Image: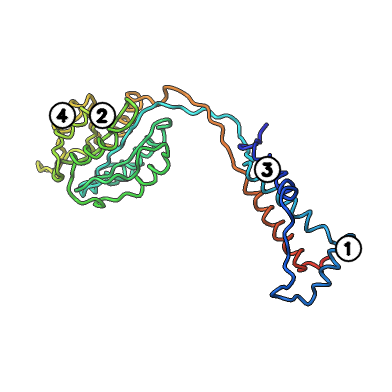
Amino acid sequence: MNWTLALPWALALLPLPLLVRRALPPAQTGGGGALRVPFFAALIEERRPGARGARWPAWAGIAAWGLLVLAAARPQWVGEPMTLPLSGRDLMLAVDISGSMREQDMVIGGRVVDRLTAVKAVAGDFIERRQGDRLGLILFGQQAYPQTPLTFDRDTARTLLFESAVGLAGRETAIGDAIGLAVKRLRDAKTDERVLILLTDGTNTAGTIAPLKAAELAAQAGVRIYTIGVGGDPRSAFGLTLGRNPLDEATLKAIAQTTGGRYFRARDVEELQSIYAMLDELEPVESDQAILRPVDELYAWPLAAALALSAVAVAGRAGLTRRWI
């Protein structure tokens, strides 16, 4: 059966108007009304037993009550069972959007792009594959900002990542603050699997907490950190070094080692893709399954019909539909 009633006991209210009518005495009408209706006699005549159209407003009212009770019973359309993977893992993704992420030393499809664009392309696919994980997003520069809480809504996290821009959180880099914010969000999680993937191209130059101190706090909270250093190596020409590489690999390696994670180096898009593929293996998605049956609420249809019939019944009793009878 594809449709059902969420509250079938509500159907017991169907005879309520009849019970109220039998239990309560009829309403008393006063002798003198404050308003005299010139066509009162015509209304009485029209509603006289056997008069044309005398009963249809009552039937409309009865039908409206039945539809209202049906809406209260919450009819639902239940879809076919769906199997969802569940890992029980909480995963935060912290992405550096400081000024250095504007450096154009990455290539996608033969086109040179900046580092953040490359990260968006690869990390977006990674987010899309994390079915079963609760995933959160942190963007950091001079300050760290939570973009999404831990959620199964991967589409929102992916959209907010794509909408980020270089310099939106300041030009400097607060790696320690990003780790501290992630630990704060993951610390109260009920699962035992708490993972942070930190992606940066620089050195900690801002913030209120040192990266290694934040890593110690993460280890105490049971948060495992995978660090990814992004950006190409400095180019050389005529014996001169072109560009700069401010990446503090020693600190990123220490952060990963302190928390039981790993450090990765991504010099181009291909390496970045392989790193995320490796993370899929290190932190596999599916460990259990849950059965879900999608449910569509249908109460709005009988509710709307009940309101429409009620309006028709009131209009009929007021004599507004005489010309249609």
Query: How far across and down, in percent of the image, does residue 107 sit?
Result: 30, 42
Residue wearing tag 1: 51
Name which residue lies at 10% across and 43% down: 240
For label 2, count other residues whose C-alpha is less than 10 Å away and answer few (under 14), some (14-19) or many (20+): many
Report the Cα–Cα distance between label 4 and label 1: 93 Å
- Disc 2 or 3, which lies upstream in sequence? 3
Q: Relative to residue 248, is residue 274 drawn left or right?
A: right
Q: Nearer the viewer, residue 311 or 38?
A: 38
Callout 1 amino acid: Ala
Are the residues at dot 4 and dot 1 in contact (C-beta closer than 8 Å)? no
Q: Relative to residue 209, is residue 222 drawn left or right?
A: right
Which type of secondary structure does the marked residue at label 2 adopt?
Answer: strand
Query: How far across and down, in percent of the image, does residue 28 sit?
Result: 73, 62
- Disc 4 or 1, which lies upstream in sequence? 1
Report the Cα–Cα distance between label 2 and label 1: 80 Å
Which type of secondary structure does the marked residue at label 1 adopt?
Answer: loop
Q: Nearer the viewer, mark 2 or mark 3?
A: 3
Residue wearing tag 4: 254
Callout 2 amino acid: Val
Which type of secondary structure does the marked residue at label 3 adopt?
Answer: helix
* Residue, far right: 50
* Residue, far left: 239
Residue wearing tag 3: 13
> Visible in this render: residue 243?
no
- Disc 2 or 1, which lies upstream in sequence? 1
Query: Which quadrant of the figure has residue 36?
Result: bottom right
Q: Nearer the viewer, residue 11 or 296?
A: 11
Q: Nearer the viewer, residue 277 or 131?
A: 131
Name which residue lies at 21% across and 31% down: 218
Residue wearing tag 2: 223
